[in-house]
Amino acid sequence: MKFLAVLFILFSFVSSYASPAGAELIIINANVRTMASAQSKAEAVAVSGGEIVAVGSTKTIRSLADENTKVIDADDRLVMPGFNDAHVHFAAIGNIFSSVKLVETRTPEEFVQRINDTVRFLPKGRWILGSGWDNRSWIPNDPPSRDLIDAFTADNPVFVYNTDATAVLVNSKALEVAGIDKATKDPAGGRIFRDSSGEATGLLRGSAIQIVERLVPKDHMRNWPQVIEAASNYAASLGVTSVQDTHSDDLFILLLALDAQRKLKTRVYDCSNLADWRKFAAKGVQAGSGNPMVRNGCMKSFADDEMESTAELERDVIGADKAKLQVAIHAIGEKPNETALSIFEKAAKINGPRDRRFRVEHARNASDPDRGRFTRLNIIASMQPWLFFGENGTGSDDFKKIFEHKTLVAFGSDASMTDFDPIKGIYAAVTGKNAISVEQAVRAYTVGSAFAEFQENIKGAIEVGKLADIVILSDDIFSIDRSKIRNVRVETTIVGGKVVYQKDEKLKL
Ligand SMILES: [Zn+2]
């Protein structure tokens, strides 16, 4: 037995030592910004078992490939850790794609483009609903037909109203689902438009609309598995490999199920309402419970100017913290920040020292002495540079001061309240008079947000042993003119070593 055990140990040592050879995926000829403290630049990365197994020169990494290795030649483009958005409302992001706005489309091409922009994020079978088109203002102004959209909507029924809801355009899939064919008669008070051969064109009027409308799922906006899948597809297209869902709904079970079906392309840390902390504590949930794809244990609440009493908030924070849950409080303005910090300070004093990582969501416009408190008490400022960008034309907050204070900062978007694109967030943080460096902004959107969710040991940097969550960008945001950063696009997104998005390719993988 002893001999076997030794053999086994030897074997596992050899196999783990040898694992980089035959890497699943390698990225070569790249301008790698690792965001790691030790080695900040490299040319190539190797991935195996969903993790980064080697970082180095193209020559060394190339030697780790065999005939099964996927090789990505980055052609000198920027390769960096995937973005980790520390503050989103994930279901709401998915619901952006639950209906298409077709108002003010000027041409049939524009109409087609808007539908295409939505369908590329939707799971197979999900309906595409929308309204607002008016072909009378199009050039040319012919009524639309299913031929415009069929080619890219084969898997999704389309049902889109015109501007005054008197007509609907549906695609072939919707006609098929509704059983409308050559033999179908016009219903009383309705018309199925037909081409010269008698086939339905997809245009329906009057009571004919209802033949399809009654099939549209009533729970369309609340079909959370489909809604979340759309959000995750969208995240992949923006290079967002992790999100922290600060919405109070509890999506944990649903997210686990989606992940089990391999439909999740984004790692999610799911926050819930602080008032429910006892329910989570009773189940033994603690900060960051779960697996590398889906985690919970983060409790979210609010502090605002109108609060008459903070006693209840204080009790909940102390209780949740004692149960080793993580607590995040939303605060915008001097008073709410002061309230949140005071409650956190008190809770830490009562419950004693531990690695608790209290967070203030937004942490906007805190007073200068309170900025010092963030640092002193190790409280995370979870900030969204793009959300408040443009309010005063000088950037979204006094990031310069905040970073001078050495505050622990995590960046995010607050989408769907605002644009989900992390590139815009970085652009907002590095332009204007309170700008910080691109390095600082990227760090807050990777290493910083990983720290905010207790994941800094496995996320946030391109380092051996960390999860292979990687993006390739069209341009080097570290060296181009800062004004041009907002136009930079994500070319490739990799989550756990798998390519989940490739520019110009259909997302359905
Ligand atoms: Zn929010």
Image: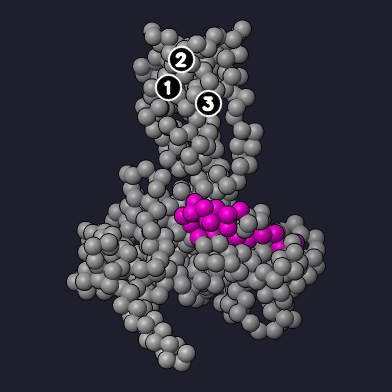
Seen at 36% across and 68% down, the residue is 48
Q: Closer to the N terminus: mark 1 or mark 2? A: 1
Q: Position of residue 7 (x, y in %)?
A: 39, 87
What mark, if any, has residue 146 been given in the picture? Answer: 1
- Which label belongs to residue 200? 2
Outermost residue, front direction?
A: 1
Question: For residue 363: magenta?
Answer: no
The earlier-in-sequence mark between 3 and 2 is 3
**SS of the residue under disc 2:** strand
Q: Which residue is mark 3?
A: 177
Q: Which residues are magenta?
A: 254-275
Tell me residue 375's x, y (percent). Answer: 56, 77
Q: Nearer the viewer, residue 30 or 7?
A: 7
Q: How many marks?
A: 3
Identify which amino acid the numbered label 2 is placed on. Ala
Q: Secondary structure at mark 3?
A: helix
Mark 1 belongs to which amino acid?
Arg
Measure the alpha-carbon separation of dots 3 and 2. 14 Å
Q: Tell me if I can see residue 263 in this picture.
A: yes
